[in-house]
Image (spheres, grey):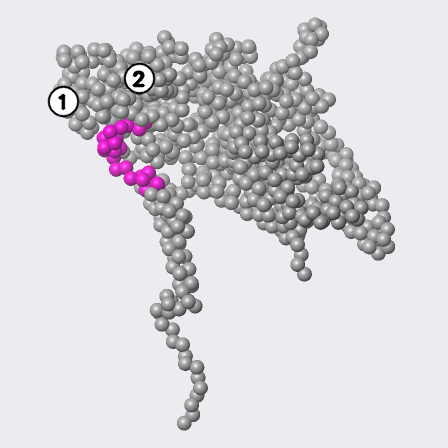
Amino acid sequence: MAYVADAPKASFRPSMLIYDTRYRSITIQVIVLLLAVLFVGWLADNTIQNLAAKDKDINFSFLWNRAGYDLDQQLIPYTNDSTHGRAAMVGLLNTLAVAFLGCIFSTILGVFIGVLRLSKNWLVSRLMTVYIEMFRNVPLLLWIIMVFVIFSEIAPAPKDFKVTDEMIAAGELPKASMMFMDSVAVTNRGTNIPMPLVEHPLGYVNLGFATANLTVVALFALIGASIYANRRVARHARAVQEATGDRPTIWWKSLLILFAPSIFFLWALGFHLEYPELKGFNFKGGLNVAHSFTALLLALVLYYGAVIAETVRSGIIAISNGQSEAAFALGLRPGRTMRLVILPQALRVIIPPLISQFLSLTKDTSLGIGVSYLDLRGTLGGITLNQTGRELECMLLMMLIYLLISLLISFVMNIYNHSVKLKER
Amino acid sequence: MTKSVFLGTLAASALVAGFASAGTLDDVKARGELICGSNTGLTGFGAPDANGEWQGFDVALCRAVAAAVLGDATKVKFVPTTGETRFTALASGEVDLLVRNSTWTFSRDNDLKLDFVAVNYYDGQGFMVKKDLGVTSAKELDGATVCIQTGTTTELNLADFFKFNNITYTPVTVADDAEAQRQYLAGACDAFTTDASGLAASRATMPDPANHIILPEIISKEPLGPVVRHGDNNWGDIVRWTYYALLIAEEKGITQANVDEIAASSTDPEVRRLLGVEGETGAMMGVDNAWAHNAIKAVGNYGEIFAANIGESTPIGLARGLNELWSKGGLQYAPPVR
């Protein structure tokens, strides 16, 4: 008789799903997941049923219908014969334009203000405090509307720029004049700035869903290549410095590599500026930047500049005093201490909250509706929604697009965060 | 989790609540109050006066319906809606009736699932410019900046008009009439376009109405009228016939002042049917038999409403024009009460 010393085989009983701690948490999670899925399904089903009861369906085909309305700011060609989908695309680009410029300018302003707020100069630091508290504590929408109203109420009308023969004879000056050597005109309808043009454009290529301007693409490619080449030069200089202790002079090489190719490229294509001119009712030629855009961008930059300034300040304060003392002991001047020692370390603290500021800024561009800025909310969620009556479809699509933009920004910023965060070895 | 379930339930119940109404008439009677979608404030058509009382041409129709259904013209709650929110407010059941200078179009009737039950004002889109601009025709507006209210038929008409005449313009889209007027007065646009009646109403509230002219071109047909939800025919009939009752009253010379007297003395069979002296017109629609009597008693006939709110003796100063009765060369025509 052989006894086999087997461990008693644990038999699984259904009651263990509740009483055995090994399985209990899984049971609970499965149940909650099921409930959540059921709930979402019920919501969707309820919506569809109720829409059906009102003879409505969920249908996105309106995106391919003729839009029929005009937009005042368009970064890609658009006429009222284009489709609603195209109009939404114009709106999306307007959103991205404000969001992109807003993120860049507010970061620059924020870092500047945040550093100055910590200045030992009493007056400067107090001024910055006043600025931050003023902008951070008033709703953003009010700032947007205020900037807009100031522009449209105070700026002169285009006809004030007019110079007639009688006025010349009488030696009178027009009521308003253009700025920066007659190149920029701020009127109550918009800001007219010179438009960069090339005489021999490289043409366009049709990509099916959009047309790409080859001149712009080539210019960006050239700038990218220049930056890459410049980094190679800098890396080589660093290698030489580490090997020999002497850093070769490269500033003129950098300048040459960074700017010469682009300048030559533009010169070859016949780059020139088209200046705005008063003709008839309005300024013609040049680029007319609507006040809704300027007001939205300016208000976003001023507001988020203040918010980012606080983030920057918190990041700097988080770096122990010993760091700057050590830097001073090595003989670094305050400016270089900040740039080489403090800020690189502070970035680790600054970046994560900065990501959420960028996300908020991007989403807050939809406040442009207050000044009728035709962004995604104004086209897809505004005019298109109204003219087609497809509320649910437009809202769903708009939410999806904002979600994608936000996830994309998070993704890019997280990569950057990864590159600056403390490397633990 | 608890919170999100709570919010979800809230959202779901809101969805259900929006569509719960079986019949609008029953809802209104049960509530004892008519909820009427109105303008956010367009003088003459629908705006609160100095005492906070809603007054205007469109508002009077809401009051007439309340008088016909509930017997009391004061039992109306006015919900201000913008060009963007009005149809959603109606479709979701937030308002029972929308009387807000809304143009009857094919797509609104069919695609938005709404019913336009009558045309209480025949309008057309026009342009207003400052006199010193020196423009006398809309076709001279080449290159002009035009202020336009978004979410309306006007922005589509505008695009078509400029395209058809091969001239260009820059649109400045604004959310409502008040903002359009501010921008126009500030000079942010050369011309302001909306329905001609709206332009006249807007001009009446400007500090210097004499310095603004409405250009002669009328670039579109804008039949404005009361709107109800698609599918509730009984409620649509009540609104339609309340409006027709006001028209017939003008045709027959029944006014707010003499309606009681005429009801007692008239021998005209149609007047007697209309005012509920004989026949069962109210019962057929499910309202009191004196529905038309109450409506006329509350707000007067169509001509009186027109004259009191937007007529030539008011600051808005609109002529009857197309809105004259058919018997006087206009388009306002009511089918017989029979």
Q: Which chain hosts label 2?
A: B
Secondary structure of residue under mark 2: loop
Alpha carbons under labels 2 and 1: distance apart:
25 Å
Q: Amino acid at mark 1?
A: Gly
Please say if A242 is above or below A123.
below
Q: Residue furthest top?
A: A170
Residue B334, horizontal then vertical, whole percent = 26, 19
Where, by quadrant of the figure, is residue A10 drawn?
bottom left
Instruction: State which mark lies toward you, 2 or 1.
Output: 1
The magenta segment is: B14-36
Q: Residue at x 21, y 11 (%)?
A: B258
Are tags 2 and 1 found on a single chain?
A: yes
Q: Which mark is residue A246?
A: none
Secondary structure of residue under mark 1: loop
Q: Which mark is residue B279?
A: 1
Residue B83, horizontal then vertical, whole percent = 42, 27
Q: Which chain hosts label 1?
A: B
- Main SS, magenta residues: helix
Residue B268, horizontal then vertical, whole percent = 16, 13
Please say if B9 is above or below B272.
below
Tag 2 residue: B332
Q: Residue at x 80, y 43 (%)?
A: A254
Looking at this view, is B51 or A330 the one in front? Answer: A330
Q: Residue at x 57, y 26 (%)?
A: A147
Mark 1 packing: few (<14 Cα in 10 Å), some, or many (20+)?
Answer: some
The magenta stretch spans residue B15? yes
In the visual, does B261 lie left or right of A105? left
Q: Residue at x 25, y 37 (%)?
A: B22
The magenta stretch spans residue B77? no
- Quadrant in the picture for the C terminus of chain B: top left
